Every structure is written in C-alpha cells, then in structure tokens.
C-alpha cells in the first residue's frame, strides 16, 4: 500500500521545474516515514520501488539505477540514524538521509549534464528540506499514536 501511495504522490502530484528537466514530488515523505516506522530496509525497498517506477514511467528511465541507490540509501541512513540518535536529535536523521539522496542525484546529473548539474541539485535540496520537514510533522503525531497503541496493548486494553 505504501508503494502505491508513494507512486501516486510522486507521479500525480509532481511539480515540474527547469522546463521539465525534473520535478518536485512528495513521495520522499513516504520513504522517510516507512524507514522510521517499518525499519530502514523496508523503507529502502518501498522508496526504491515506487521511485524507480515513477522515473521509468515518467520518461526519466536513465535515472532508475541512481534512483534505486539514492532512495534506498536515504531510507537506510534516515531509519538507522532515527534509531540511534537520542531524543529530538533523531529527527535530523531524516534530513541527513535526504541530503545523501541529493548527493547521489548530483553525481547522476554531473554524469549526464556536466557542470550544469548544480542547478538541478538546488531543486533537489529544496525537495529534501520540504520532505524532511513534512516527514517530521507527520511522524510526530504518528509516534504518539503508536505509543498509545503500544501502551494499551501492554496494559491489556
């Protein structure tokens, strides 16, 4: 279900930029949430799956290998940092994982476009920031919900 939701958020709610050279999307929020809630490896599978399908079916097939690597590492890094960082600092794991994704895409842009790669990476940085913030704002109430459910389960309610 998360793969389908991520695909819909990526393909149908995309915002093109730079004359169609790329697009903003909200699928990364699903990848980040899956990495934290379900675990880094599930998040990696979910994010790499729907993101690579979105690239393939949106005319960006040349980016599929980079997308698989970028989204998988974003989820793995975000998920693990969230688990090991203490208290409020754990939310920075979302941003750090997203920045790794931006770095991988920067390499792909450089391979395909040369020195003009930094322009697309600026848009990716904005997407990483927005996705991390949305992930944080959605994760905070979800944590409370799951904690409440866990407490009810432990108390026998």
Image (spheres, rainbow, N blue to C red):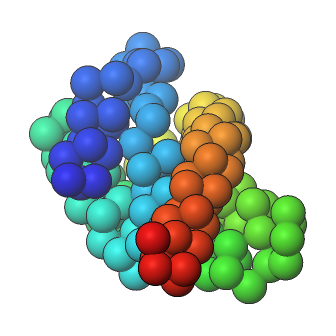
**Where on the picture, by quarter, is residue 119?**
top right
Residue 34, placed above or below residue 120? below
**Where on the picture, by quarter, is residue 64?**
bottom left
135 to the left or right of 13: right
Q: Is residue 93 visible?
A: yes
Which residue is most to the top? 19
Identified at 42% across, 50% down, the residue is: 30
**Image location (x, y in percent) of residue 65:** 30, 65
Which quadrant holds the C terminus? bottom left
| 155 vs 132, nearest the viewer | 155
Residue 57, placed above or below residue 140? above
| 111 vs 9, nearest the viewer | 9
Residue 145, placed above or below residue 11? below
Identified at 47% across, 48% down, the residue is: 28
Identified at 84% across, 78% down, the residue is: 86
**Image location (x, y in percent) of residue 148:** 58, 63
Residue 92, placed above or below residue 119? below
84 to the left or right of 41: right
| 112 vs 150, nearest the viewer | 150
**Image location (x, y in percent) of residue 139:** 60, 52
Q: Is residue 69 visible?
A: no
Which residue is most to the left? 57
Identified at 47% across, 29% down, the residue is: 24
């Amino acid at each position: 279900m998360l793969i389908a939701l991520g695909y819909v958020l990526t393909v149908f709610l995309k915002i093109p930029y730079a004359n169609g050279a790329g697009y903003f999307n909200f699928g990364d929020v699903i990848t980040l949430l899956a990495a934290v809630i379900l675990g880094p490896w599930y998040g990696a599978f979910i994010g790499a799956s729907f993101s690579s399908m979105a690239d393939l079916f949106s005319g960006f097939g040349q980016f599929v290998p980079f997308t698989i690597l970028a989204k998988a590492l974003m989820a793995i890094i975000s998920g693990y940092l969230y688990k090991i960082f203490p208290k409020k600092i754990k939310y920075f794991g979302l941003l750090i994982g997203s920045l790794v994704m931006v770095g991988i895409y920067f390499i792909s842009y450089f391979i395909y476009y040369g020195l003009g790669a930094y322009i697309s990476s600026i848009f990716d940085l904005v997407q990483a920031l927005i996705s991390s913030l949305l992930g944080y704002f959605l994760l905070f109430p979800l944590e409370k919900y799951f904690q409440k459910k866990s407490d009810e389960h432990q108390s026998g309610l």
